[in-house]
């Protein structure tokens, strides 16, 4: 029976990882997947996480099931991290949060609860967005619309076009917004733009659906959470998918949370019940390990400070590589101006080269990036930088 199934195209990001892994060129450079790498090209286990892991392994005395939505302490620490201490939605008990299997699990569970609440709601997704948003959220049966987001000629957010497109959204539709470090463009809304969007969605009866996959990779935890916290303070409802893959380096542990801010505290238990029910239908409950580490780190002021410091170091390395790349391409004799890469945030930017040039960088130089020319800046280090810059300059000179 199974022989009738078609072979599907490889995932645009994971397929690239596999291609790069198979490439035997010693000079190959992986700018594909959004995974932090240090100066030596390694993805470290953070020191704070390692210490939490040692403590956890010593203290863990059972593998019995934990509460399916996460321990109470984990949820309360995570709410405080995301929304900020003393945020009105926490004080007023208006947020329903459960643990989820990474950002993907959070997005999928949230989408299914939205579908149950209103199957006619559409999700408005930025164009471009993370390539897995539509397949992942679409499997809940929801419909999508796109709003233009990026002006490739100016290499910045096309805010006017975004707002003009959202004029067509109907009451009850959801607007998916990247909380910080927009994937793939690295171009984020300014604080003023977040405020304008907040007022707009409030007036139109739209609901923000924030995907927070890179908290702390832009400017700081507080600055990156500005939009989320502002919206949560000023709007009656909001959906949030949060991932600890990048900021805690817990990629393979599948650690995240999904939150729904509701109008009235009386709705928290109902929404929690729905979130848990959807999770039960899909994967029952999330793995315990990663969440236990996050809980241990956030509960201990010393470990938490260490984590914040390590997050700042990861962010600092990426910012440094953004500058080194732009200066290096210029030094390699390329006329094109890449200064915008210095101004953008987080793991990604578009290099802005065309598909043929992306292909040539891959086949002739073993430099891997997605077809859109999205580069994961974390893949750059001082060792591969000269080869990368020279290769880009050569391909662009043709
Ligand atoms: C990425 O965009 O590269 C990351 O979010 C990893 C993934 O799952 O696609």
Image (tube, rainbow, N blue to C red):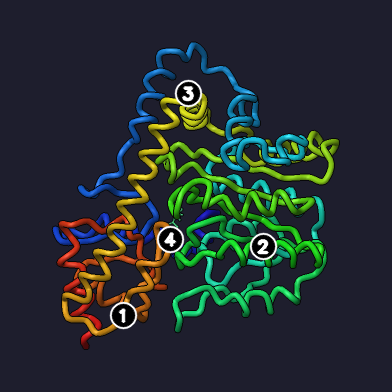
Ranked by sequence position, the earlier of labels 3 and 4 is 3
Residue that carries the numbered disc 4 in the rendered image: 345
User: How far across and down, in percent of the image, does residue 374 sit?
Assistant: 39, 68
Ranked by sequence position, the earlier of labels 4 and 1 is 1
Any mark on residue 337, and which? Answer: 1
Pointers 3 and 2 in contact (C-beta within 8 Å): no
- Kindly tell me whether residue 233 is visible in this rendering: yes
Q: CA distance from mark 3 to mark 4?
A: 29 Å
At mark 4, the secondary structure is: loop
Pointers 4 and 1 in contact (C-beta within 8 Å): no
| Residue at (71, 73) in percent of width and height | 166
| Other residues around mark 3 within 10 Å, as few (<14) / some (14–19) / many (≥20) | few
User: How far across and down, in percent of the image, does residue 169 sit?
Assistant: 76, 71
Using the image as rendered, state which of residue 27 and residue 44 is in the foreground.
44
| Residue at (66, 36) in percent of width and height | 86
Using the image as rendered, state which of residue 20 and residue 335 is in the foreground.
335
Q: CA distance from mark 1 to mark 2?
A: 31 Å
Mark 3 or mark 2: which is in front?
Answer: 2
- Kindly tell me whether residue 121 is visible in this rendering: no
Answer yes or no: disc 1 within 8 Å of ligand 1. no
Q: CA distance from mark 3 to mark 2?
A: 34 Å
| Residue at (52, 52) in percent of width and height | 224
Answer yes or no: disc 4 within 8 Å of ligand 1. no
| Vertical comparison of 301 with 8: above or below | above
Ranked by sequence position, the earlier of labels 3 and 1 is 3
Residue that carries the numbered disc 3 in the rendered image: 300
| Residue at (53, 60) in percent of width and height | 132
Quarter, ligand 1? bottom left
Residue that carries the numbered disc 2 in the rendered image: 195
At mark 1, the secondary structure is: loop
């Amino acid at each position: 029976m199974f022989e009738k199934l078609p072979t599907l195209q490889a995932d645009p990001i994971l397929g690239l990882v596999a291609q790069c892994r198979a490439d035997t060129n010693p000079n190959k450079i992986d700018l594909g997947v959004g995974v932090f790498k240090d100066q030596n090209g390694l993805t470290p286990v953070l020191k704070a996480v390692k210490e939490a892991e040692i403590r956890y392994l010593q203290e863990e005395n059972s593998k019995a099931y934990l509460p399916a939505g996460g321990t109470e302490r984990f949820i309360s620490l995570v709410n405080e991290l995301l929304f900020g201490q003393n945020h009105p939605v926490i004080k007023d008990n208006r947020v329903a949060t459960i643990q989820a299997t990474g950002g993907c699990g959070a997005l999928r569970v949230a989408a299914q609860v939205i579908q149950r609440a209103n199957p006619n709601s559409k999700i408005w997704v930025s164009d471009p967005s993370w390539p897995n948003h539509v397949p992942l959220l679409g499997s809940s049966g929801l419909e999508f619309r796109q709003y233009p987001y990026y002006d490739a000629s100016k290499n910045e957010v096309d805010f006017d076009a975004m707002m003009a497109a959202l004029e067509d959204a109907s009451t009850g539709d959801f607007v998916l917004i990247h909380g910080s470090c927009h994937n793939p463009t690295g171009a984020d809304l300014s604080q003023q733009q977040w405020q304008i969007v907040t007022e707009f969605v409030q007036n139109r009866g739209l609901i923000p659906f924030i995907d927070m996959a890179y908290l702390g990779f832009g400017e700081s935890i507080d600055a990156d959470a500005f939009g989320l916290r502002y919206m949560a303070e000023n709007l009656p409802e909001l959906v949030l998918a949060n991932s600890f893959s990048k900021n805690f380096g817990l990629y393979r542990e599948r650690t995240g949370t999904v939150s729904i801010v509701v109008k009235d505290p009386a709705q928290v238990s109902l929404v929690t019940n729905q979130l848990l029910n959807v999770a039960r239908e899909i994967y029952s409950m999330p793995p315990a390990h990663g969440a236990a580490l996050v809980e241990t780190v956030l509960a201990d002021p010393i470990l938490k400070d260490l984590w914040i410091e390590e997050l700042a170091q990861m962010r600092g390395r990426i910012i440094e590589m953004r500058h080194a790349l732009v200066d290096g391409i210029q030094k390699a004799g390329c006329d094109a101006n890449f200064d915008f890469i210095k101004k953008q945030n987080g793991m990604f930017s578009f290099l802005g080269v065309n598909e043929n040039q992306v292909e040539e960088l891959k086949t002739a130089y073993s430099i891997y990036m997605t077809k859109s020319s999205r580069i994961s800046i974390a893949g750059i280090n001082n060792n591969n930088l000269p080869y990368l810059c020279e290769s880009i300059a050569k391909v662009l000179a043709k």
